[in-house]
Each structure stands twice: as C-alpha cells, then as structure tokens.
C-alpha cells in the first residue's frame, strides 16, 4: 500500500501540489477556477466532518452515558457526572470483574484449542499437496458463509443432554469451532507466503523436517499466526449469540453482562461494560495492518 | 511484513559438498522435501530400466504416504468443524421436518409461515437494504482512498473510516440504542443545528435503527477488503484514463470497480450472512413485531422451548443465505469463464 501511496504522491507532485491534476485547471487560472477549488475544499471538509460525526458521535454518546450520574429527557447532556457506577462495576464483589475474568479465560482457552488444530491444518493447506484441497478449504469457509443461529440452537440442545451446557468447556468448544475457521485461513495464507527456497536450503544443509519447520517455517510465518491468534481471541471475547444459548445460565461473559444490563434499563452499567469491550477491539483496529497487510486480508476471503 | 530473519536458514553444513556428491545427497533425502511435483528421485534418475521403475514405484509410495500425512494434519480441524458445526446444522434440518413421534411433517413450516411471514419479509428487507447501503459506502470510501488526489483528505479518511471495524455487534447495538433514542445525541444535534423542530424529534429505534447499526458496523469491513484490493491494482490504466481527462467517478466505475468485483462480492456476502444471524442488534433495538427472524427463534426457544418451529425458522433463514451465496457463486463462475 505504501508503494501505491508513493506512486500517487509522486504523480501528483508535478501539478504543483494542487488537487486538480487536470492540465486545464492551471491553464485558465481565473478567479472562477479559484472559487471552484475553494468550494471543492469546503465540500470535502463538510463530507469528512459528517463522516466523523457518524463514526464518533455514537461513540461519544456511549462515553457520556458511562460517566452520567443523572440523564433524562429533555436535557441534551447529562445533568451530573460521576464515577458512582464505575465504583459499582469494579466493586470487589461486583460481577463485572468476574465476567471479565470468565471472558478472558474462555478466550485464552479458545485460542489454544483453535491454534492447536489450525496450525497443522494451515501448514498442510498452505504448503503440502493435498487431495481435494479446494473442497477442504470450502469446508473451512462454511461457518462464515452460513448463518450460525441454527448451529447454536441445536448444539445447545445436545450439550444440555450431555451436561456441557452452562460450562466453560462447552462455550470454549463453540467459540473454537468458529474461531478455527479464520485461524485456518490466515495460517494457510501465512504458510503459503513463506519462501519455499529457504526451507529447501535448510533441508539441503541437512536439517530434519521438524528442525526445518521449527527454525525456518514457523518463525517466518509467525506474524500471520500471531494475527490469527489475535483474531480468534477477539472473536471469542466479543461472541454473544453462542454464549447466549450454550452458556446459559452459569457462564456470564462480558457481552452477556452488558446485554443483561442494557435490557434491564441500566444504561450506565451497560455503557461502562461496552467501553471495556471496546478497548481490545480498537487496539486491534489500530495495529491490524502491522500484522496483516490489506492484500493478505483480501486473500483471506477468497 | 518485513520479517526475514537475519540468520536465515541454519548454516550448519557450511561446506556444501561440490558437484556430484551434492546431487547424490539431494537424491538421498529428496523424498523428505514437502514440495509439490514428482519426487526428486524420479526426474534425475539415470537410464537403466528396472532401477528407474523401482524408483518410480518407490516415488508413488512416498507420494501417497505424504498425501496421507497432509490429510492427517488437516483431519483434527475438519473434525472440530464437522462435529461442532456441520452436525448441529444437519440436526437443525432434520428437526425442522419431524413431529413429536419422529415422523415426517411440514407442520412446523406451516406454523412458521403462519406466524412469521411478516418477520421474514421484514428480515429480507432489512438485510438487503443494509447490504446495498454498505456497498455504496464502501465503494465511495475505498474509491476515494484509491483515486483521491488530496493527500491530507485521503490520510484523514484512511484513519477515520475503520474505527467501528472490530466493534462487536452487541456493543454496536448498545451504542445505537442510546444514540438513536428520542433523547439521544442524534436528535439533539439535529435540533441544535436547526435541521428539525424539537416537536418532530422521534426515536429511530425501529427498522431504521437496525439498518444504521448494521451499516455502521459492517461498512468498514467491506471497505477494508475493497481498499486493499484496489491498492493492489496496476495503476497504469487508472493513470491513462485520468490523463485522457476522464472524471474520477468514471474511472472508479468503469476501470477500478470491474477489477475488484470479486472482493466486493466476498465482503458483501460475508456481511449479508453475518447480518442474517445477528441476534443482539435486533433484540436491543427493535424487539417488537415486526422484527428479525433471529429474535423469533430466540423467543420460540426461551418462551416455549419450541425447537421444532425454531429449526424451521432457522432453515428458512438458511434459504435466504443460500440465495446470497448463489448470487456470489454465479458471479464467481462467470468470472472464471470470462478469464
């Protein structure tokens, strides 16, 4: 992407930094053209401002709710600000901290289970000659391409019968079966992008297959694998529907806590919990391109 | 992704044996290389009938062995998907057609259509409208990121558009629940700027709220995919068209978009399916009838433990998703045929 940027800036440089690269614009540099350019600048700023409001307005509203002590119709802003609800959420006996712990514990287990099966599968799909490779990749695409609700509904019923409903392991299995899919796709793209000649060189010099995988392939694929681990972690932390059906009534993750608070009309607690959930999401959004270039992301869905 | 390690592959065998012995060595462990194509042993075999045949047989043996190994590596992941995804899906399909005694019946579908036809139409309308809006937003933003000639505006937009990217649906539901309420920030801003009268302020927590939440959350995802695909395009055509005086929107529609149509469709189909199976957003924004099918499914289960009708409803929404997938597949096939 940076190459494209460089090319773009290089190609707009000769026109003197103006954003109308068409030669006509500077041939008749009359006051009309200047006014038109001014109008264009105002319009561009206006559109960007509208977009900024559309994106940050809702987020700002959430932050206001998180710090509002009192807020009712028809006041535009909260009548009182304070941290009463934060203290309640983070009280030692409060269930928010317990839910946070449950969420993180489930997500860590989900990452371990998913990667344990996704790394070998990704290696085989990205590197080895595999019969019915297309069909297998399609099977791994299925959970993304099919609505998940029927799956959750029926798996909850089965888990209830065998005693897995309402347990951490039940929720982890549901999360892993879904997170696995992304992990396999990203891992196979990561392994496919490792230069095969480096492996061959290692093997030529006498490294065993396992040593070669451990010291050459795995480190080279590590950024992609790291990205898939983060994806799986986030997906598990954010997952709602599966936990709603399978975790009930004993497993309360952060999204479920937020949902219950919101449906109970307690907007402050819901907003504070929502802010907690936003932290990992936005942190990942900010660094995602360090792990995954957009063209790799685009490859993932193909 | 500059991650090439400085030490590179192990340099243990620094004295690479020269000439013939190297070839011999390569042949010796050629059968271990996990690479495609025929085993090395076969192609550098010197003439000499039975030896070559023997080696070829050995090669076939190794090849099937290696395929088996590759398959064994994929098997655990396939099993997890099979047991925890495909099997419940099959159960759903079976459950939708069985009555209390296990006999075949269509009664559950009749009941579903009887009670929830309005909700089915509502669901289709919401998801299709959201998908169209997502496509428009994504094309506009990704197009400007690719063709925009004002570097600062492009940089700001690139920073701006992706904030909702990884925000979960359930949080998006909560955010919009407060933002779009009658007393929410949107109405206050509209009144403050004089765009509407205070008296005409209304809650948008109905179908509009669901669509806004969906577009707000999913458009950045499609935009990210689309902008990535556009950035990977050859720029010669774009620049040629621009030099000939084509306006940017023509370049976007006539030159850029046709080349990234596949990526756009993938993003839209994934969003379409995701929106079809979201429970939290409609439950939080618009739980009353008419509402989306997912809410009805949860209601049938939580209130009546009526898994049969729930499964029938699920199957109907699967059918909708299949339309989306078929639409995508048809285009994918046409693309392959044209290539």
Image: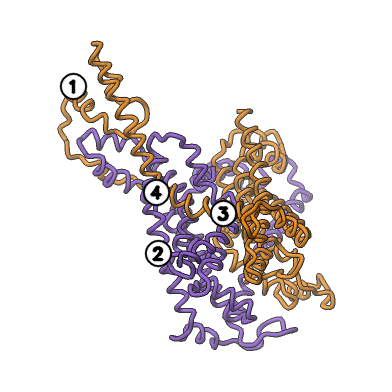
| Chain bearing mark 2 | A
**Seen in the image, is B60 located left or right of residue B307?**
left
Q: CA distance from mark 3 to mark 4?
A: 21 Å
| Chain bearing mark 4 | B
Depicted B70 relative to depicted B268: above or below? above
From the image, state the color of chain B: orange
Q: What residue is rendered at 73% in x and 54% in y? A: B124
At numbered mark 2, what does the secondary structure look like: helix, strand or loop? helix
At numbered mark 4, what does the secondary structure look like: helix, strand or loop? helix
Disc 3 + disc 4, Cβ < 8 Å:
no
| Chain bearing mark 1 | B
Residue carrying label 2? A108
Total numbered labels: 4
Residue carrying label 1? B19
Residue carrying label 4? B76
Residue carrying label 3? B91
Disc 3 + disc 2, Cβ < 8 Å:
no
Image quadrant where residue B70 sits: top left
**Seen in the image, is A43 located left or right of residue B273?**
right
Q: Are marks 1 and 4 on the same chain?
A: yes
Q: What residue is rendered at 65% in x and 32% in y? A: B334
User: Can residue A1 be seen in the rendering of this structure?
Assistant: no
Give whichever of discs 3 and 4 has the lower sequence position.
Answer: 4
Q: CA distance from mark 3 to mark 2?
A: 29 Å
Give the purple chain's letter.
A
Q: x%, y% of residue B168? A: 56, 64
Q: CA distance from mark 1 to mark 3?
A: 63 Å
């Amino acid at each position: 992407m940076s190459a494209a940027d460089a090319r773009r800036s290089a190609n707009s440089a000769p026109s003197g930094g103006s954003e109308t690269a068409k030669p006509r614009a500077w041939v008749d540099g009359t006051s009309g053209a200047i006014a038109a350019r001014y109008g264009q600048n105002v319009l561009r700023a206006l559109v960007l401002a509208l977009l900024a409001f559309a994106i940050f307005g809702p987020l700002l509203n959430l932050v206001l709710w998180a710090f509002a002590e009192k807020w009712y119709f028809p006041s535009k802003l909260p009548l009182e600000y304070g941290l009463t609800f934060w203290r309640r959420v983070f009280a030692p006996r409060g269930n928010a901290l317990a839910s946070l712990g449950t969420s993180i514990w489930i997500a860590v287990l989900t990452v371990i289970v998913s990667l344990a099966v996704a790394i070998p599968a990704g290696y085989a799909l990205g590197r080895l000659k595999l019969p019915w490779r297309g069909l297998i990749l399609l099977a791994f695409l299925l959970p993304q391409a099919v609505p998940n609700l029927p799956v959750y509904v029926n798996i909850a019923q089965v888990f209830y019968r065998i005693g897995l409903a309402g347990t951490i392991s039940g929720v982890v299995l549901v999360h892993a079966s879904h997170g696995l899919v992304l992990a396999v796709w990203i891992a196979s793209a990561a392994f496919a992008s490792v230069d095969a000649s480096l492996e061959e060189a290692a093997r030529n010099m006498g490294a065993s297959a396992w040593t070669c995988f451990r010291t050459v392939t795995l480190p080279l694929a590590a950024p992609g694998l790291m990205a898939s681990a983060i994806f799986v972690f986030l997906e598990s932390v954010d997952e709602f529907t599966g936990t709603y059906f399978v975790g009930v009534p004993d497993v309360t993750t952060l999204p479920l806590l937020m949902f219950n608070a919101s449906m109970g009309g307690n907007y402050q607690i819901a907003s504070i919990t929502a802010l907690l959930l936003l932290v990992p999401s936005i942190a990942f959004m900010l660094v995602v391109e360090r792990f995954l270039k957009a063209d790799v992301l685009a490859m993932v869905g193909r | 992704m500059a991650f090439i390690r400085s030490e590179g592959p192990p340099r243990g065998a620094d004295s690479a044996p020269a000439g013939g012995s190297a070839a011999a060595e390569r042949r010796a462990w050629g059968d271990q290389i996990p690479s495609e194509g025929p085993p090395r042993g076969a192609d550098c075999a010197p003439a000499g009938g039975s030896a070559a045949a023997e080696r070829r047989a050995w090669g076939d043996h190794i090849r099937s062995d290696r395929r088996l190994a590759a398959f064994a590596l994929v098997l655990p992941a396939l099993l997890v998907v099979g047991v925890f995804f495909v099997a419940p899906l099959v159960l759903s399909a079976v459950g939708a057609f069985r009555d209390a005694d296990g006999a075949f019946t269509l009664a559950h579908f009749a009941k579903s259509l009887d009670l929830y036809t309005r909700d089915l139409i509502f669901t289709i309308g919401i998801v299709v409208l959201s998908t169209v809006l997502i496509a428009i937003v994504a094309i506009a933003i990704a197009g400007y990121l690719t063709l925009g000639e004002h570097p600062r505006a492009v940089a700001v937009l690139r920073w701006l558009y992706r904030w909702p990217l990884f925000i979960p649906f359930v949080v998006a539901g909560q955010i919009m629940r407060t933002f779009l309420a009658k007393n929410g920030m949107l109405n206050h801003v509209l009144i403050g700027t004089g765009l509407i009268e205070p008296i005409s302020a209304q809650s948008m927590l109905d179908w509009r709220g669901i669509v806004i939440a969906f577009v707000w959350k999913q458009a950045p995802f499609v935009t990210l995919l689309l902008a990535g695909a556009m950035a990977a395009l050859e720029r010669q055509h774009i620049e040629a068209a621009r030099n000939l005086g084509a306006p940017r929107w023509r370049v976007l529609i006539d030159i850029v978009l046709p080349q990234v149509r596949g990526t756009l469709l993938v993003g839209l189909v994934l969003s379409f399916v995701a929106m079809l199976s979201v429970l939290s957003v409609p439950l939080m924004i618009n739980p009353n009838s008419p509402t989306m099918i997912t809410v009805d499914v949860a209601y049938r289960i939580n209130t009546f433990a009526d898994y049969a009708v729930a499964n029938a409803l699920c199957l109907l929404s699967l059918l909708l998703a299949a339309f989306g997938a078929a639409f995508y597949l048809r285009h994918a096939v046409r693309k392959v045929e044209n290539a």
